[in-house]
Image (cartoon, rainbow, N blue to C red):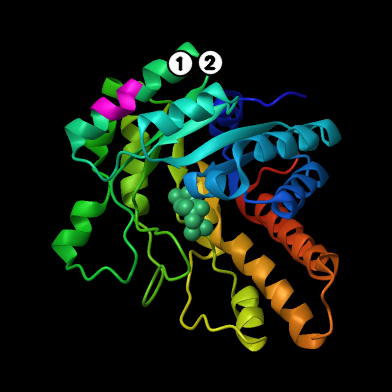
Amino acid sequence: MPLVTTKEMFEKSMKEHFAIGAFNVNNMEIIQGIVDAAAKENSPVILQASAGAIKYARVPYLKAMIEAALEEHDVPIALHLDHGPDFETCKMCIDNGFTSVMIDGSKYDFEENVALTKKVVDYAHAHGVVVEAELGKLAGIEDDVNVAEADAMYTDPDQAKEFVERTGCDSLAIAIGTSHGAYKFKGEAKLRFDILAKVKELIPNTPIVLHGASTVIPEYVDMCNSYGGNIPGAKGVPDEMLHEASLSGVSKINVDTDLRLAMTGAIRKVFSEDPSVFDPRKYLTPAREEIEKTVAHKIRDVFGSSNKA
Ligand code: G3H
Ligand code: 13P
Ligand code: ZN
């Protein structure tokens, strides 16, 4: 089937209380690992490319590899721009067949975020493309902030309602305590489910997106560390919290770090166990297998999107 937008996916996810995994793609092995897992689980899936991924892999290659995935598999696949930094990048992706774009105006103040998001929404909707926007700030633990400053970063539910009404965005990424990368929490993991509940109460028909939602899977952190890596103190969002989020109105859960760890752990293991290896297929094959295992686990055991294709 051709690429789909996230519109139908999200309608189903909100009605049936599950979340759709949005996985970051950068190369062929990552794409194959993700779509093979989605096909085996009969699940919809979102492939997302950041500006960095586009710079690395280049649009024609990404498009062609995703075309190949569509040829091989019959599950709904959306192609999404992750963290679009400006109107021009969003326009370029819309003009190149992406079915969904994110405009990330969270670095701007509220009014500027509204204006930029609205501009992208107008162009995207005229071309049949849907738009994810972001309100609130995702902070990492390295940020030296006090409680009042931390509170100011969470999404304000009343502002979220106003933001969606004024911009017409199709889905909204909110800040409830997650952050990007491998170091999300210093102590216990904690998410503000009360903010999520209030947002869902005020804008029940807007699909909600969780960024920075990798589990930072301990097995892969250990694998990286025990085969020569140095990733001490890495910590992510536990599966149980992500499962709760997927039952509580989160429709899209973003995962990049876990794929990086799975891939790197697998490659480090091959190199450590057999330093004579120099055929890329010898280490990229296990890397692709670990990506597939990771994605299948999330789809099946955490997000609940198996058999929702
Ligand atoms: O949220 C950001 C994603 O993990 C993408 O990261 O910009 O390094 O491709 P990137
Ligand atoms: P992680 O770093 O937790 O995987 O988050 C990825 C993400 O939010 C991509 O937009
Ligand atoms: Zn993100």
Q: Position of residue 200 (x, y in %)?
A: 38, 36
Q: Position of residue 145 (x, y in %)?
A: 20, 67
In-front residue for pair 292/105: 105
Verify whether residue 120 appears in magenta.
no
Q: Position of residue 150 (x, y in %)?
A: 22, 60
Where's the C terminus, which quadrant?
Answer: top right
Q: What residue appears at the point 67 percent right and 74 percent down from the top-left corner?
A: 265
| Image quarter of residue 261 | bottom right
Where's the N terminus, which quadrant?
Answer: top right
Please state the extent of the stretch shown in magenta in the rendering.
Answer: 115-119
Marks 2 and 1 close (CB-CB < 8 Å): yes
Q: Amino acid at mark 1?
A: His
15 horizontally vs 305: left or right: left
Q: Which mark is residue 125?
A: 1
**Which residue matches tag 2?**
128
Magenta portion: prevailing SS class: helix
